[in-house]
Image: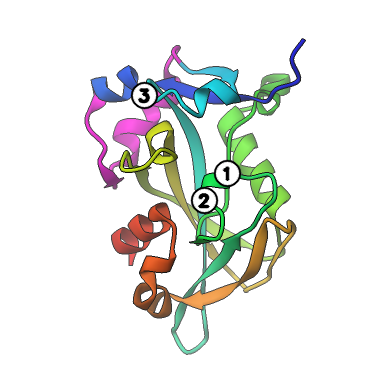
């Protein structure tokens, strides 16, 4: 039996039957509710899925927002390193925490999407702050090979304190940066981060 990771995917045809996502889509419920309720959701071997755009891999993409006492809004940002993540994104700055939903996230009847999101957060960072969570939108960017096979679900965590630390070497130079600074240097960010910041800030 293969030990390859099996990840949560949805056929592109299911998304197309709901509507078109191009860039950032703010109407989360219109798409995500039917996707997560679909009997077409399945866990497939990761390697073939990385090059098969007829399936989209569902990826939680969590923005960690902290507002300083002076009112400056900041996002946790990091540089993708050379660890076990998506090698095609290395050396890009990112404001999104998250990753694939794995077959193991569905154990014991758990909600695989929510379980996988929180597992990925716990693997990538130590989050010591309380927070308010909202789902903000979906991201689909077919302009590159990574984007063609992934569908991002953007979550915003508004934190009570800036208590966040990277857990992985893959998340280098982690820290809070003001939204204004990120906008000024937006070309240094990966595409999903650019789309999320432009849509939400």
Question: How many angstroms separate mark 2 from mark 1 (CA)?
Answer: 6 Å
Looking at the image, is 7 positioned above or below residue 169?
above
Dot 2 lies on which element? helix
The N terminus appears in which quarter of the rendering? Answer: top right
Looking at the image, is 89 positioned above or below residue 37?
below
Q: Is residue 157 magenta?
A: no
Q: Is residue 28 magenta?
A: yes
- In the picture, measured across the screen, residue 182 lies left or right of residue 25, that is right
Q: Which residue is mark 2?
A: 89
Q: Which mark is residue 86?
A: 1
Q: Residue at the spot x=36%, y=42% of the render?
A: 144
Q: Tags 2 and 1 in contact by the CB under 8 Å rule?
A: yes
Q: Residue at the spot x=55%, y=67% of the render?
A: 77
Residue 200: percent from left, percent from top: 33, 61
Dot 3 lies on which element? helix
Residue range corresponding to the magenta coloring: 18-40
Looking at the image, is 164 positioned above or below residue 46?
below
Observer-nearest of 167 and 161:
167
Q: Which residue is mark 3?
A: 34
């Amino acid at each position: 039996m293969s030990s390859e990771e099996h990840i949560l995917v949805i056929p592109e045809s299911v998304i197309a039957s709901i509507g078109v996502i191009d860039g950032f889509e703010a109407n989360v419920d219109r798409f995500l509710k039917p996707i997560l309720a679909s009997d077409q959701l399945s866990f497939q071997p990761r390697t073939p899925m990385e090059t098969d755009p007829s399936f989209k891999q569902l990826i939680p993409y969590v923005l960690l927002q902290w507002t300083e006492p002076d009112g400056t809004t900041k996002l946790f940002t990091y540089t993708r390193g050379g660890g076990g993540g998506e090698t095609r994104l290395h050396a890009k700055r990112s404001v999104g925490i998250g990753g694939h939903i794995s077959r193991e996230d569905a154990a014991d009847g758990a909600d695989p999407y929510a379980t996988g999101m929180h597992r990925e957060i716990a693997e990538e960072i130590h989050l010591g702050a309380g927070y308010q969570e909202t789902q903000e939108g979906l991201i689909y960017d077919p302009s590159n090979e990574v984007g063609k096979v992934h569908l991002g679900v953007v979550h915003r965590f508004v934190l009570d304190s800036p208590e966040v630390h990277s857990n992985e070497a893959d998340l280098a130079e982690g820290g809070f940066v003001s939204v204004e600074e990120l906008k000024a240097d937006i070309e240094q960010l990966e595409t999903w981060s650019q789309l999320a910041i432009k849509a939400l800030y």
